[in-house]
Image: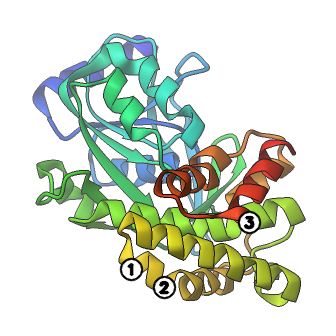
Amino acid sequence: SNNGIVCRCYYRETHMPTSWHILGAGAIGCLFADALTAQGITTTLVLRDCAASAPLLTLERDGKTYNRQLASTPASAADQISRLLVTTKAYDVVSAIGSVRHRLALGADVVLLVNGLGYADQVAQIAPDITLYSATTTEGVFRRGPWDFCHAGQGVTLVGAMTASAPADWFTPWQNLGLKCRWTESIEPALWHKLAINCAINPLTAIHRCQNGALATRPELAAQVRQLCSEIARVSAAAGFESTANNIEHDAFTVIENTAENRSSMLQDTLADRPTEIDFITGHLVARADQLGVAAPLNSKLLEQIRHA
Ligand code: PAF
């Protein structure tokens, strides 16, 4: 029963400090729930919109299909959360954390594994007593049914603290997950680089309803990618992200090639009639460009196009 789950979590939270809650039961959240649970780490999905039951996860990887029983708890429950991995959409981060704020332990570790940038300050405002970490991943996993996912591409997850620091104590078991997780002392440049890649790829694929590969094979789209990248490079240089400034065009075309068959997350959101993360991707870049006095006209144009689509 729900009570059973809640009570067991409370017991574990008190006696086993390595337990995790995951907020955002999408593809990445379920991938981590599976990987953490497989390591014997008590992991509980926090469900916001339905009474908690224990979902049976189906995950396909390397042509094999696995099932795993996951624990869950409703956001509204009362038991404490001391470690929280947030894997929601960018526009849901603040309200999702708000829905469990009453459960967050003083000094709780909260890891934001979310696309885009621009929500961390608001999170720190609504939950000032937490220790905030950020992460970015290249894992490729997509949803096929309510609790049915396919882990299509092995990637790497970079994790770090916003102010550079040695790995957190909770990170040690993350190095032994079936997923590649690496600690970085420079998570901010890594998040910016991912943002830059998303700015170069996602809006164009959503507007032209094309797979990523078309951005290299259709000359008129490739020319737009190059223009986006030159704008992104200027903003990156002004913002102090030298590595992205120097490499963005090369890196964007490499990702396009490596994910040629993929539909970007923004295209998937558009096709499913869901809100997109544009305000936290291109919207964040354009806001930084404005602050820094750097022109980013094509990025601004695509931002408006997606906002009004
Ligand atoms: O958002 C996405 O879909 C991905 O981050 C990327 C890299 C654009 C590949 O599809």
Residue 22 vertical position relative to residue 33 in the rendered view, above or below: above
Residue occupied by mark 1? 243
Q: Quadrant of residue 151?
A: bottom right
Residue 298's tag is 3
| Quadrant where ligand 1 appears | bottom right
Work out which residue is located at the far front of the displayed protein and give it.
293
Residue 247's tag is 2
Mark 1 falls on what kind of element? helix
Residue, x 43% and y 73% (percent of image)? 237
Q: How is this picture coloured?
A: rainbow
Residue, x 54% and y 58% (percent of image)? 289
Q: Which percent across, then down, holds residue 134?
A: 34, 51
Mark 2 falls on what kind of element? helix
Kind of residue at disc 1: Ser
Kindly indicate whether the residue at mark 3 contacts the one at mark 2 (C-beta within 8 angstroms): no
Q: Quadrant of the C terminus?
A: top right
Residue 57 vertical position relative to residue 138 in the rendered view, above or below: above
The residues tagged by marks 2 and 3 sit, at their Cα atoms, a distance apart of 19 Å
Q: Quadrant of residue 97?
A: top left
How many residues crowd around disc 2 within 10 Å: few (fewer than 14), some, or many (20 or more)? few
Residue 71 vertical position relative to residue 189 in the rendered view, above or below: above
Residue, x 45% and y 12% (percent of image)? 76
How many residues crowd around disc 3 within 10 Å: few (fewer than 14), some, or many (20 or more)? some
